[in-house]
Image (spheres, coloured by chain):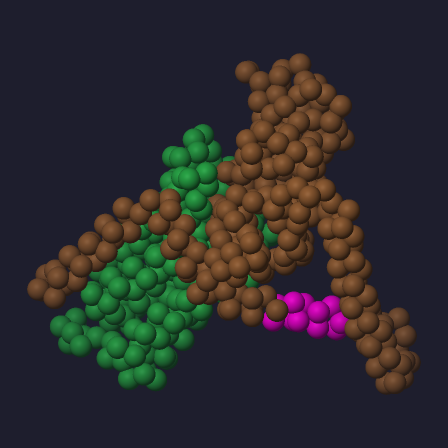
Amino acid sequence: MIFFFLLLVLVLIAQIAEFFIPALPWLDNAHIYIVPVIVFYGAMALPFPLMLALALYAGLLLDALTVQVIGGKVEISMGSSILLYVVLSGLMHGLRPLFARGRWEVHCILSGICTSLIVLVQYLMITFRRGSLVFTREIWWQIGGPGLIAVAMAPILFWFLQWMGRVTAYSYFPERDHFE
Amino acid sequence: MSRTNIIALLIFGAILGYFLSFGPESTRKLKAGVYQFIAPFLTGGSGLQKQITSVRTGLKSLEQLERENAALQVENRALRATNQGLRDVEHEVNRLRHALNYRERSVFKLIAAEIVTRDSSTWWRTVTINRGKRDGIETDMPVATDVGLVGKVTTVSDSISVVLLVSDENCKVAASVEGSREQGIVSGERVIAGLNPLLNLNFLSKQADLKPGQKVYTSGVGGVFPSGLLIGVVKTFRVRELDGQAQLTPAVDLSHLEDVFVVTGRK
C-alpha cells in the first residue's frame, strides 16, 4: 500500500514537473510526458482495483490541468482522460504475466505507443470539436514525439520504480508462481 | 473476474460517470481547486527555475571571459562575476521600470502579474500567472503587455490563474486593421511550427488587399477585449474561396513572456 501512495505522489510530482519542461524545438515542439509512463508501470505492478484508482487519479489531474473552459463550453469533457487512462492501463495490466517473468521490453515499447495514443486521442477530440481534420508533419511529430521519448525514458523509470518497490518491500506478484 | 474486482469496477464506473456529467461551471471550479492545490509548487518551481537560469547565464559569461583573457586574476574574475550579478539586477530594474511606466500611461486599469509556468500540454497554448481571485482577477479578463495583446484569463483560483494565449486556436479576438475598414476574427493555429507562432485573421473581405506591416488592433466587438490593443502585424494576405485571410506576426513575443498585465477595465 505504501508503494501505491508513493506512486500517487510521484504522479503529482511528474505532473508538476511537466509544467517546467519546455517543448522540444528539434522535435517539432513535441512535449515530454512523464506521468503516462508512471501510470503504465503502476498498471503492471498494482492489482486491478489499485490500477483503476491510479488511472482515475492521473486522468483527473490531466483533465483538471489541461481541459479549457472557453466561452461557457468545455472542449474535452472532464473524465475523458480517466477513461483513456483506464483503457490503456487495462491493456498494460493484461500483460502482467510477461512483466512477472522479467520481460520489460514489450512494456517499454507499449508505454511509448500508449503515450502517443493519449496525445492522438486528445487531438482527435479537439478536432471533432473544432473541425478540419488535418495531419501535417508537425502534428505527427507532436503525437509521435512524446511516445518516442517515453520509450527512451521507460527503462530508467521502470528500473527506478522497481527499486522503490523493493525499498518499500512491495510484494509485486503474489500470483507470480502461477505464471512460472 | 473476482468479486473485489467487480466491486472496484462498479465504484470506478460510478465515479467516472460523476465526472463525465460535469458541466462548464463544475469543471471550472474543479480546475481552480486543483490549480490552487498545486499553486505553491508551481510558484516555488518557477523561482527555482529562474535561479538556475541565472546561474547558467553567469557561468556562460565567465567562460567567455576566460576565453577573452586567459591571464585574468582571481580577483578580477570575482569582480566581473559581481558585475554580472549587478547587470542582472539592472536588467530586472529596467524591465520593471518599463512595465511601471506602461501601467501609468495606459488608458486601462492594469494588474501586474508574473508568468509562473508555460503550457504543459500539446494542444492548448496557456500560461499560468501569479495573480488570482484575491487580486481581483476574473475569468475572461484580457491579458496584455506594453507591446500588445497576450490572451485572456480562463481559470481563476485564489492565487493563480490560467491565461489562454492569443496563439491558441480557441482564443478568438475581434479585430480591425489599421488604415482600412476591414474587420475580422483573429485566432491562433492548432499546431505551431517552429518557435514563433503565427496568427490568422479570418473573415476579411476578398478585396481587403492587406499589405505586410499593417497593424491589427482589437476592435472591441464581443465585449471581452477592449478596443485599441495591438494584436499583431500583417505578414501575408491571401484570397480564399469565400473570404480573405491574413497571417499575422504576434506583437508580443509569446515564447519569452516574463511580465504581463491583466486588464480589469478602463481608467
Quadrant placement of the C terminus of chain B: top right
| Residue at the image point whose x is 65% and y is 71% from the top | B52
**Foreground: A1 or A23?**
A1
Please state the horizontal and vertical placement of residue B207, each as a whole percent of the image: 66, 14
**Foreground: B142 or A10?**
B142
Residue B252, compared with residue A160, is above or below; it is above
Q: Colour of chain B?
A: brown
**Apparent side of residue A57 relative to residue B117 in the rendered image (left or right):** left
Q: Quadrant of residue A86?
A: bottom left
Residue A7 in view in this figure: yes
Q: Which residues are magenta?
A: B48-61
**Chain letter, green:** A
Characterize the magenta stretch by its predominant secondary structure.
helix
**Foreground: A72 or A78?**
A72
| Residue at the image point whose x is 26% and y is 64% from the top | A53
Q: Quadrant of residue A11?
A: bottom left
**Apparent side of residue B78 relative to residue A111 in the rendered image (left or right):** right
View extreme (top): residue: B207
Q: Is residue B58 magenta?
A: yes
| Residue at the image point whose x is 40% and y is 39% from the top | A73
**Apparent side of residue B227 relative to residue B138 in the rendered image (left or right):** right
Residue B238, compared with residue A12, is above or below; it is above
Residue B200 in view in this figure: no
| Residue at the image point whose x is 33% and y is 66% from the top | A41
Please state the horizontal and vertical placement of residue B113, each as a whole percent of the image: 63, 57
**Apparent side of residue A91 relative to residue B69 in the rendered image (left or right):** left
